[in-house]
Image (spheres, rainbow, N blue to C red):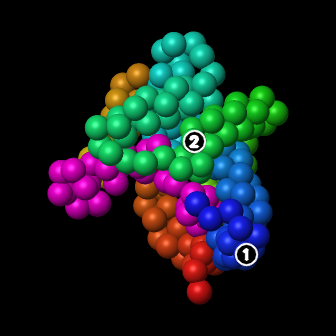
Amino acid sequence: MNWSPRALARSIDRPESRRLPRRLVQLYAGLALYGITMGMLVRAELGVIPWDVLHQGLSRQFGVSMGTVVIVVSVLLLLLWIPLRERPGLGTLSNAVVVGLVLDATLAVLPPVESMPLRVLLVLAGVLLNAVATAAYIGVHMGPGPRDGLMTGLVRRTGGSVRVVRTSIEVSVVLAGWLLGGTVGLGTVLYALAIGPLVQVLMPRLSVRLHH
């Protein structure tokens, strides 16, 4: 590697280097917001994110916090990346830890909600803000989340379509989570239908351009 002052100057002046502070801020803000929105849907008690049906079910079965389950499941999924030959990035590893910690913190400060209009509002706001969070952390190009990497790895290894593989994974985790006591409802269905179109609209606005 060339460590001359001129070479270092060129490296620092690259778009990806100059934009690193913004990318890091956006990454961790997006992950924190993601954990907050998960907590909002949990407190609404009208159905949680598909993967959270599994997390919630495991949490109830093992008597540990939901955030702890999110972190443990993330680590286990990363182990599955090894035979799939997926490469984690900083965003991947941060996702595995930050989201679970923020989820537990959110549930600690956000009390249960009894009013039905407020519960519906929590679901609507939670889904919308989750889309913002998803576009934010994907848009910094620092590695997919553990669950997204599992999907892309299976798509590459099996040759199946993204839609079929993703649907198969999410149906499986929702069914398993429901059998374990996770909450399936309006929020789950709304999230499944709305998150894709919302992220597609938001991605161009939150994606960081690394090259001219």
Q: Position of residue 27 (x, y in %)?
A: 67, 56
Q: Is residue 74 magenta?
A: no
Range shown magenta = 135-164
Q: From where the camera sits, is residue 35 visible? A: yes
> In the image, is residue 39 above or below residue 136?
above
Mark 2 vs mark 1, foreground winner is 1
Proximity of marks 2 and 1: CB atoms separated by less than 8 Å: no
- Residue type at numbered disc 1: Arg
Which residue is labeled 2 in the image? 93
> Quick check: 130 left or right of 55?
right
Mark pair 2, 1: CA separation: 33 Å
Q: 104 or 127: nearer the eye? A: 104
> In the image, is residue 201 above or below residue 79?
below
**Which quadrant is home to the C terminus?**
bottom right
> Quick check: 153 left or right of 202?
left
Q: 211 or 47: nearer the eye? A: 211
**How many numbered callouts?**
2
* Helix, strand or loop under label 2: helix
Question: Label 1: how many residues lie within 10 Å, few (<14), some (14-19) or many (20+)?
Answer: few
- Main SS of the magenta part reads helix
Q: Position of residue 11 (x, y in %)?
A: 67, 71
Residue at 47% x, 43% y is 146
Q: Which mark is residue 6?
A: 1
